[in-house]
Every structure is written in structure tokens, then in C-alpha cells.
């Protein structure tokens, strides 16, 4: 399930919050792809799911307010300012009652980018709690 499941744009993995079992993965090209498959995917995420998102290349050109709202409901605060070629990783949950989520966002800034027209790579590790009833 976890192989050959990444691509340009927004990459998402959905995990069962109680068992830790991978449920589904998808990627959505936000430069020249269609926004509707992303919106439908986000709407289909079940309560109690942990949602992991990482970006590659351009995560934001096609993002609309509906998609941003659905990601904001998963706990993201950076989704509102996500722009062209920004780097962003996020872990949130559907229906979670948490004070904060895990998120890191590096803006694409030609004057500060580490790799010419690319911001610094995000490296991140940690542990996630299970959903408790």
C-alpha cells in the first residue's frame, strides 16, 4: 500500500487513529491538476483518522477556499498561507479534540531559498498518539 503513492503537489496518507493501520494514500497535482479529486478525498476521510500531508514541488496553485477549509478543519493553521513551491508537512486528525497539531511550513522566498528557487527541505520525526475514546 505504501509504495509508488507519491507525486507532485500534495501527498496524503490516512491512518486509522486507533489501530495505526494505513487506510489510504493519494497525491494531487496542484499545478496543472484538478482540485475536485482533492476536495472529494478530503471529504471522504472518516472521523478518528490521522491525516499526514507532505508537499512536493507546488502545493498551492490550484488550491481553492473549499480545499483550504477542509484542511483547516483537520487542524492546519499554515494552509491559509501556503503558496507556490512552499514546503509543508502536517499531521492532523479528522474529528480530533486536540489543542494543537504537528506542522512545519517553509515559505518559498527567492532571496532566502536554500536551493535557488526551492526552499530548504523539511526533515521531521516524532511520535503520534492514538485516538482514545
Image: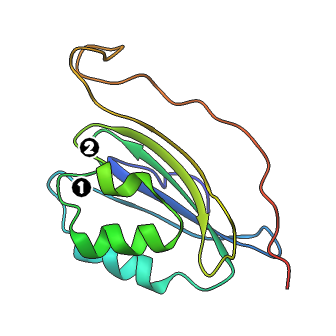
* In-front residue for pair 123/69: 69
Q: In this view, does 12 lie to the left or right of 107?
A: right
Residue occupying the far front of the picture: 99
Q: Is residue 22 left or right of residue 121?
A: right
Q: How many labels does the image show?
A: 2
Q: Which residue is drawn at 48% across and 55% down?
A: 5
Q: State whether residue 70 is above or below residue 80.
A: below
Badge 1 marks a residue whose secondary structure is loop
**Quadrant where the image shows the N terminus:** bottom right
* In-front residue for pair 39/102: 102
Going from N to C along the chain, the mark reached first, 2 or 1, is: 1
Badge 2 marks a residue whose secondary structure is loop
Query: Image quarter for residue 101?
Result: bottom right
Q: Where is residue 65 in the image (x, y as percent from the top left)?
A: 23, 71
Q: Where is residue 98 in the image (x, y as percent from the top left)?
A: 69, 68
Residue occupying the far left of the picture: 32
Q: Distance between the residues labelled 2 and 1?
A: 6 Å
Q: Position of residue 39 (x, y in %)?
A: 32, 77
Query: Image quarter for residue 116?
Result: top left
Which labelled disc corresponds to residue 39? none
Q: Badge 2 local density, few (<14 within 10 Å), some, or many (20+)? A: many
Q: Residue at x 26, y 55 (%)?
A: 29
Q: Is residue 90 left or right of residue 118?
A: right
Q: State whether residue 120 is above or below residue 38.
A: above
Q: Badge 1 local density, few (<14 within 10 Å), some, or many (20+)? A: many
Q: Where is residue 104 in the image (x, y as percent from the top left)?
A: 52, 41
Q: Which residue is drawn at 71% across and 37% down?
A: 125
**Quadrant where the image shows the C terminus:** bottom right
Q: Mark 2 points at which residue?
A: 58
Q: Which residue is drawn at 46% across and 26% down?
A: 121
Which labelled disc corresponds to residue 30? 1
Contact between marks 2 and 1 (CB within 8 A): the answer is: yes
Amino acid at each position: 500500500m505504501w509504495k509508488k503513492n507519491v507525486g507532485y503537489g500534495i501527498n496524503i496518507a490516512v491512518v486509522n487513529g486507533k489501530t495505526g493501520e494505513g487506510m489510504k494514500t493519494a497525491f494531487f497535482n496542484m499545478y496543472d491538476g484538478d482540485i475536485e479529486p482533492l476536495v472529494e478525498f478530503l471529504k471522504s476521510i472518516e472521523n478518528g483518522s490521522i491525516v499526514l500531508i507532505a508537499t512536493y514541488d507546488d502545493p498551492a496553485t490550484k488550491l481553492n477556499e473549499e480545499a483550504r477549509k477542509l484542511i483547516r478543519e483537520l487542524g492546519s493553521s499554515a494552509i491559509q498561507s501556503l503558496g507556490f513551491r512552499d514546503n509543508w508537512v502536517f499531521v492532523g486528525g479528522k474529528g480530533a479534540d486536540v489543542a494543537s497539531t504537528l506542522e512545519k511550513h517553509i515559505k518559498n522566498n527567492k532571496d532566502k531559498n536554500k536551493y535557488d528557487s526551492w526552499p530548504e527541505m523539511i526533515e521531521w520525526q516524532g511520535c503520534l498518539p492514538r485516538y482514545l475514546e
